[in-house]
Image (spheres, grey):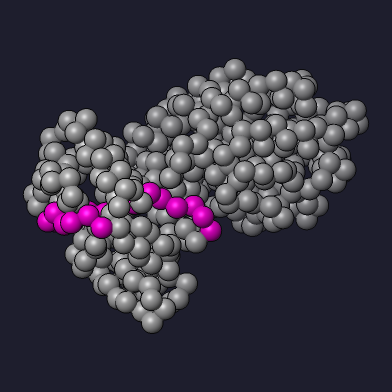
């Protein structure tokens, strides 16, 4: 029982230090009860499944990365694949100096429609479709990544040797400490990188640099150092071969705070400060492509319990109106939000273990095991914190279930900090 009371103490302590329009929760139960959330709290009127977005938080995160890397004047491009909702895009577009990293024609079109022009966009998908390259060039995008000769065949078609496109090579890099590794699919080793840079030059393109990605949700700042060390031989060999490299793209990977504290952008910046000079001496331009680190904690998901069942395996299953196909596809691989259960009437404390599952009939649609300090029933809600990244962009209406409705957190008088994750 001890940990039950510990959860309760932490929970009540966290609530009492806050002040906002509607107290959350309003009913403070006796210490042996899990507190209800007031029936008139706006959280009960939020439709479910939904995603409450906080664009200001995304812009603040963007500025934090810019500021941390001001020492090298890094150009930060938001990896819009992580959450291309227009509210977030426009909040980030308003940050002076902001750029956008894209992977497809449709992403470019979204930005153009918002009045963001090609000079603020770079194309860092190593394998592109020719029509997408053509569209990008026509709309003023000048910087492209590649990691194969066949990609150069495509880029060459749309290049004007009088005003050549800038190209840079994606390299393989260590992924230690990344919860979502991006290994194998892209990237080359140093010798192949140098060969590709020479080939680009021979074809009339302008090779300018090297890129890597340490993997998503990377919680080990030293991995960026390891990656710089891994690409250093290519930098050296290329420059010795007369290729005037001046840029380095250190990708994304900045972590979002899920259930544990994570390194802040300045901790990653402090780690790479000296390594840049050591491993890519003479660099002039640094690019970053953060996605999750910008939007991860700029969204919370609200789900409703639609069923509870005991199964022959002895487990209690809790069925929700959103799941794997609502965009929660990373959960089975370990990227887990913290969860705040919401109930309408106070209930006795008592630790329960639930298997969470989404609404569809597919067995893939299971999430994770959750310990709740209180019994949960139909109609209760769960707030999944730190749900801003990759959920909105990936959610599908599979099996006829609605994708999460997107709402502005401020319009619902809710703040992300209202919800203290406890599971
Ligand atoms: C090329 C590229 N850049 C940036 C990102 C963003 O990564 P993260 O969300 O980990 O910052 C990704 C993610 O897949 C990527 O593939």
The prevailing secondary structure element of the residues shown in magenta is: loop
Q: Residue at x 43, y 59 (%)?
A: 328
Query: Which residue is the extreme one toward the right?
Result: 241
Q: Is residue 182 left or right of residue 51?
A: right
Q: Tally the numbered discs.
A: 0
Q: Is residue 124 visible?
A: no
Position of residue 239 relative to residue 148, above or below, is above
Q: Position of residue 404 (x, y in %)?
A: 32, 59
Q: Nearer the viewer, residue 363 or 403?
A: 363
Where residue 131 appears, as percent x and y from the top left, is 61, 56
269 lies left or right of 394 = right
Q: Residue at x 54, y 38 (%)?
A: 254
Compared to 291, does 162 lie above or below? above
Q: Is residue 325 above or below residue 382?
A: below
Q: Residue at x 32, y 48 (%)?
A: 2
Taking the image as shown, residue 343 lies to the left or right of residue 226, namely left
Could you tell me residue 302's position as x and y percent?
Answer: 28, 54
Residue 46 percent coordinates (x, y): 20, 53
What's drawn in magenta, residue-wise? 333-350
Q: Nearer the viewer, residue 296 or 120?
A: 296
Res 420 quadrant in image? top left
Outermost left residue: 40
Residue with the most extreme bottom position:
312
In the image, is 248 to the left or to the right of 260? right
Q: Residue furthest front?
A: 1
From this viewpoint, is residue 328 visible? yes
Does the segment drawn in magenta span residue 380? Answer: no
Residue in the picture at 40% in, 54% down: 392
């Amino acid at each position: 029982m001890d940990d039950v009371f510990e959860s309760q103490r932490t929970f009540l302590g966290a609530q009492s230090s806050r002040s906002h329009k509607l107290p959350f929760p309003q009913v403070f139960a006796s210490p042996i009860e899990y507190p209800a959330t007031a029936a008139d709290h706006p959280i009960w009127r939020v439709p479910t499944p939904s995603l409450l977005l906080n664009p200001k938080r995304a812009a603040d995160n963007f500025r934090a990365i810019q500021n941390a890397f001001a020492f090298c004047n890094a150009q930060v491009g938001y990896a819009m694949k992580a959450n291309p909702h227009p509210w977030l895009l426009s909040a980030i577009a308003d940050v002076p100096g902001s750029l956008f990293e894209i992977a497809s024609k449709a992403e470019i079109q979204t930005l153009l429609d918002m009045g963001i022009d090609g000079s603020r966009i770079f194309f860092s998908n190593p394998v592109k479709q020719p029509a997408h390259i053509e569209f990008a060039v026509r709309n003023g995008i000048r910087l492209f990544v590649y990691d194969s000769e066949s990609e150069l065949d495509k880029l060459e078609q749309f290049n004007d040797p009088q005003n050549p496109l800038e190209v840079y090579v994606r390299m393989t890099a260590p992924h230690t400490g990344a919860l979502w590794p991006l290994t194998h699919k892209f990237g080359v080793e140093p010798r192949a990188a140098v060969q590709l840079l020479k080939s680009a030059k021979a074809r009339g393109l302008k090779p300018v640099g090297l890129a890597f990605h340490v993997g998503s949700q990377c919680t080990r700042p030293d991995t960026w150092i390891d990656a710089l060390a891994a690409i250093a031989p290519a930098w050296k060999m290329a420059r010795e071969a007369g290729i005037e490299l001046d840029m380095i793209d250190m990708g994304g990977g900045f972590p979002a705070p899920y259930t544990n504290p994570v390194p802040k952008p300045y901790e990653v910046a402090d780690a790479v400060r000296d390594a840049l000079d050591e491993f890519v001496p003479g660099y002039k331009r640094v690019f970053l492509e953060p996605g999750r680190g910008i939007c991860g904690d700029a969204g919370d998901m609200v789900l409703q319990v639609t069923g509870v069942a005991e199964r022959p395996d002895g487990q209690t299953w809790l069925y929700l109106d959103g799941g794997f196909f609502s965009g929660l596809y990373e959960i089975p691989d370990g990227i887990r939000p913290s969860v705040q259960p919401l109930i309408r009437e106070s209930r006795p404390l008592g630790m329960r273990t639930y298997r969470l599952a989404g609404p569809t009939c597919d067995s893939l649609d299971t999430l994770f095991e959750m310990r709740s300090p209180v019994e949960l029933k139909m109609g209760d809600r769960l707030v999944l914190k730190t749900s801003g990244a990759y959920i909105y962009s990936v959610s599908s209406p599979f099996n006829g279930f609605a994708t999460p409705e997107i709402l502005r957190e401020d319009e619902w008088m809710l703040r992300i900090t209202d919800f203290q994750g406890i599971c």
